[in-house]
Every structure is written in structure tokens, then in C-alpha cells.
Amino acid sequence: MVNARIHLSAPDVSGVEERYLVNALRSGWVAPVGPDLEEFEREIARRCGTAHAVGVSSGTAALHLALLALGVGPGQAVLVPTLTFAATANAVAYTGAEPVFVDSLAGDGNVDPDQVARAAADLRREGRTVGAVLPVDLFGAVADHEAVAAAAGPGVPLVEDAAEALGATRDGRPAGSFGRAAALSFNGNKIMTTSGGGMLVTDDRALAARARHLATQAREPVAHYEHRDVGYNYRLSNLLAALGRGQLSRLDEMIARRRQLRERYLRLFAAAEGTRVLGEGDPGANCWLTTLVVEPGRAGWEAADLGAWLAARDIETRPIWKPMHLQPVYRDRRAWLTGVADRLFASGLNLPSGSGMREDARRRVFDAVAEFLDQRR
Ligand SMILES: *Cc1c(COP(=O)(O)O)cnc(C)c1O
């Protein structure tokens, strides 16, 4: 096991989750309904500081439902950061609205409010309706949602894609509490996992009720099967909610471990000319993934060189999200660009950041990085 492959962000599950899961199984609630699901929703709402939460089968489903509940649809444009995982843009495409892409800030990679303002103004001048703005809390650093909402303009609802940011804060306010609604993800590699799952959180009672309705095949509350809308089968299983409750009970501990890793990376790269850590110095980040940014001209090497060095030692790293405006599926869409996301994509590297990494694995990573830096000095 000494030389087992080290992953970017492997699931971190323990006996705690096992007990929650076994208890749920024995309770007989083996369905997308049950007491663990209800309790998990209450616990997540409390954690996010929202009045309501709807457990769903993925973060993508949560985004889709939030947009549908806000009335986003064909003919509208939705402002999406270009530097994100494809799910953010896909959720917009599912509604029939047009995802349009906006560039990033160099500091933490989150969407650039000036470009949001430019995009919103241009679209309005053309007579287009901006149906929503969908900022992402990239790699667990909460975006400046107030600035983004102001830039999008009055009447444009903000949906927070907090899929990577559970447990993070900005000025003391929790991720998930910004905007009209927010989406969380519990996919296998996220800060906490239900193997697959997500949650829509909101203060808006009617929005939550609408999302819940659409997530359960839009079945009307009558004994016979009655449907007025096209619904979805998007509810979270009670078993997975139980797993999520176990994970949530360990969330603070898991975030603390990711923050420790970030601190050690910061020390390791402090003396390495031409490098920085994306979003460094944000006290509220949950440190889901630590991203190194390398300026090859100053460093004398590229992010990909370090990636290859670590891969040869069975240590996984990944390039950061390939911007949506470069994706074959979206490259014909409109985009308001400054070049920042392109540069971050070319120069960024996500480093192993999992909370389940043991000290021997951590040491293997740090030693390999230190050796690389020595050899490049
Ligand atoms: C993971 C992720 C999603 C999608 O979540 P799933 O649960 O995998 O559907 C959406 N947006 C961002 C930014 C993500 O990282």
C-alpha cells in the first residue's frame, strides 16, 4: 500500500457514515423519501443559513431546478462564468435558455463583475432578456455575489453555484446563502459526498416548493396520478441522505484537514519564484482543491512539468477546468473575455487536496514537490 496511487480528492468516509447508512437500511426507508432525507435537508439548511433545502440526485439537478423555478427558459440569456465545470452551463442549456460566458478575475478565478456588467449591458442593448446570472464559488472560494448581482442589474436573479463550496464563507456568511437559490453537490470527489447527490437551498418558500414538485415528476397531491407539468425524477435517496448526514457530522474536521494541506503547500511554494496559490489569503475558503498557478517566464518551468513529475510518482494532479468558451460543445456561444481564464487554464494545476490523505501520503506528495523544486532551482 505504500506506493498506492494518490488521488486528487478521494472520498473520505469512516465508520461514522457506515453506522448512519446501516441504520437507514434497517429502518426500511429504502426510497427517495424518509426521515434521514428530511433531517439531512434540515441540517444542510441550518449549515447554509437558509430557510429551505431540497435534496436531489445531483448538483446539476439542483441548478436545473433552481433555473426552472425562476422561470428561466427559451429566448433568455443566462450569464455563466467561462471558468467552471460543464454542469453549470449544461443546466442552463437544459432549460432552453442560452448560456453566455463571462471571464474571470485573476486573483481567485471567480467571475469578473466588470465583465458581467459589460455582458448584461450589451445583451440589454440588443433587446435580450437576461434570465439569471449563475456565479460559481470556484474550488471553494465564495465569489463576491453582491458585486456580481449589482453588475447583472436589477431584476436579474442570482443563482449561486456552490457545488464546490459547502462550508466556505465570505465575510462570515456561508456559501449557499447568496442569491435567490444555491446549488450544492455531493458528488464523489466534492468536499463531502453521498456518492452522488445534491441540494437546492433557498430562503424562498415558493421556489423550494416548486423545485420539490418538479423533482418528484410534478405529481399533483391527489390519490390518482395527475400531472400538469413535465416533471423530473430528481429526488435524493433516503439511504444516500443518511450517508450525507454522517459526512456532514465530519465536515468541519474534513475542511480543517484540507486547510492544513493548503497551508503546507503555501509553505512549500513560498520560495518558488513565479508561483502562487489561486485565491491565496481567503480566510473563508473551504480549500476543496488547492490550485497552483505558475508563470513559466519567471519560474523557468510550467505547471504541466510538475504534473508530469508527480504522475511519474503515481500522484494525481489535474489541469483546472477547461473554459467553456474553448469547449467544442459551447465554442459558438457568445462570450465576454479578457484572457484571464485562458491564462489560468494554461498555467494552473490542481494538487492532491483530499481530506482522507494520511500523513504518509501527504509526505510523499510534499517530498516529491520539494525534489522537483530543488532540481529546477
Ligand atoms: C461538481 C459541480 C457541479 C455538478 O455537481 P454534480 O453533483 O456532479 O451534478 C456543478 N457545478 C460545479 C462548479 C461543480 O464543480
Image (spheres, grey):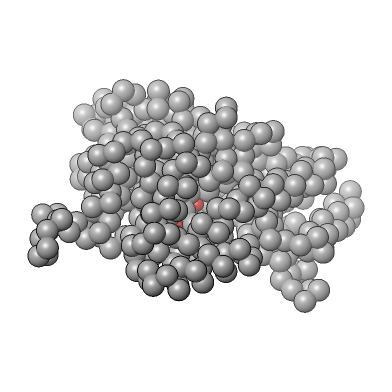
- Residue 197 position within the rendered picture, expressed as x and y whole percent measured from the top left: 43, 59
Which residue appears farthest toward the front when viewing the image?
27
Q: Nearer the viewer, residue 119 or 203?
A: 203
- Residue 209 position within the rendered picture, expressed as x and y whole percent measured from the top left: 26, 45
Residue at the (80%, 60%) spot, across then down? 359
Left or right: 327, with 106 as reference point: left
Q: Nearer the viewer, residue 366 or 77?
A: 366
Q: What quarter of the picture does the N terminus occupy? A: bottom right
Compared to 253, does 81 lie above or below? above
Whether residue 283 appears in this view of the structure is yes
- Residue 171 position within the rendered picture, expressed as x and y whole percent measured from the top left: 57, 27
- Residue 60 position within the rendered picture, expressed as x and y whole percent measured from the top left: 39, 54
Residue at the (82%, 43%) spot, across then down? 267
Left or right: 366, with 146 as reference point: right
Which residue appears farthest toward the bottom when viewing the image?
1
Residue at the (86%, 54%) spot, across then down? 370
Compared to 14, does 210 lie above or below? above
Residue 169: quadrant of the picture: top right
Count the marks. 0
Left or right: 300, with 176 as reference point: right
Whether residue 97 appears in this view of the structure is no
Residue at the (17%, 59%) spot, across then down? 219
